[in-house]
Amino acid sequence: MSEHGCELRFRALFYGLLRIRRKGRKTMARVLIIGCGGVATVGIVKCTQHPEVFEEICIASRTLSKCDALKERLQPTTKTKITTCKIDAGNLEEVVALMKSYKPDMLIHMGMPYHNLVLMEACVRCKVHYLDTAAYEPEDVNEPEFRKYYDNRCKEKGFYAYFDYPFQWAYRKKFEEAGIVGVLGCGFDPGVTQAYVAYAKKHEFDTIDTLDILDCNGGDHGYKFATNFNPEINLREVSSPGAYWEDHKWHRVEPMSIHRTYDFDGVGVKDMYLLHHEEIESLGLNYPEIKKIRFFMTFGQSYLDHMRCLEDVGMLSPKAISYNGVEIVPIQFLKALLPDPATLGPRTHGRTNIGCIFTGKKDGKEKKYYIYNVSDHQEAYKETGAQAISYTTGVPAMCGAMMVLTGKWNTPGVHNVEEFNPDPFIDALNKYGLPTRESYDPVLVD
């Protein structure tokens, strides 16, 4: 046998023994959590509800006062040992130094996706498991090296979003060799929506023909204009060209140009628009049988009017400009003017409804299936201090980390959520705050 073959055989044996060991032990883990905004707050609250897994956590953010305030609020309520630290998540050496000092078993990244690659590199160097909630995108989309990549990608693939997975998928071999697990996009969408696809394929369909992912926020926060998660990321996403996957290729459409209405369980009739979303990319790769994949999100008319006006005057631009001798990025300045999503909890009422509608075949017969979750903004706030948009992202992040730390998701490498066994993950969601609903005769989106 070749030297390479011996190495692969030894690695497979080692990982097999490691999985057996993990499955048989009681997990008590030390976790480093990056971020202290609305999503991170939910994830941290949920982690502290399960000290049998999350024995110790360190909350790290560039704003130490927010970390300290959350620790002061939560420490009297939990057996989890909480520490805090100030960190620049974009500084690799700073992150590595913290990880070497704290020695975490896992890093949960619930901050800005600009830092994904830095944090993944730190995890490789320190041999620490990794999980994030959104695909990587660069902070400066006009940086020459990224712009060259982006322009070539647009020509070759017809893919126009600033965010995609290849930069993170490039870490697969490094994670495998380090013996660590990397979970990409483990929020709700992406994240739970992909687990829903894996679940549908495993239990409901022999083949899936079409998939529509529907994200409805029926909440009302009372502001004329505000975003329910990070304004910079939200507005970039919504104002970008839309795209859907059909017949194994991308189809580009103008922003917000495809509109449908849908009657959502627990919410009512809402306007929704086709967007590009990151899980379409991985699902198209991992489920090539699916002929068409689309993503729709609901928006009210007031939101759209404000967004279009801001875009028309250049306030959504990520390109730096000089103003009175000071360099500012318009979209970042706008973010500073808008309400902080983390403060929306006490004033947001209503529900969210997020899920997947499938068509396909089972036992030779045509079949429809809808799997989804309905969450209440005020119930989420009462439990965690954050509204349901943050809740539906933070809870899956905690559940995904729990899957890795308890050995249920234990294959070294970098993976999207649909590549893992969906059953224990969905069981955890049902148990810890995001119960699943199903329909076998849903109204289809035309």
Image (tube, helix red, strand yellow):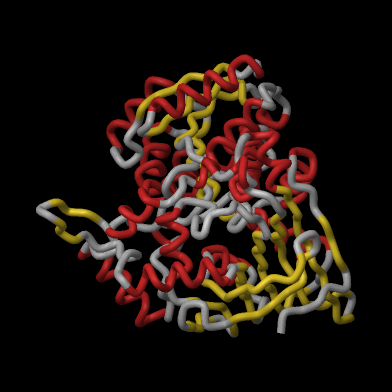
Q: Nearer the viewer, residue 43 or 306?
A: 306
- In this rendered view, identify the residue nearer to me: 72 or 402: 72
x and y percent of residue 190 in the render?
58, 57
* Left or right: where 359 falls relative to 317: right
Image position, residue 354 (x, y; %): 69, 60
Q: Position of residue 201 (x, y in %)?
A: 76, 65
Which residue is found at the position 72% from the left and 54% from the top?
A: 351
Q: Which of the 4 quarters of the picture holds residue 103?
A: top left
Looking at the image, residue 405 sits to the left or right of residue 196; the answer is: left
Residue ID at (69%, 34%): 383
Q: Is residue 17 visible?
A: no
Residue at 30%, 69% (x, y): give it: 314
Horizontal arrangement in the rendering, residue 415 relative to residue 373 (left or right):
left
Rendering quarter of residue 291 = bottom right
Any part of residue 125 in sight? yes
Q: Is residue 221 above or below residue 319?
A: above
* Quadrant where the C terminus is found in the figure: bottom right
Considering only vertical position in the picture, is 155 above or below 188? below
Q: Position of residue 41 (x, y in %)?
A: 55, 35
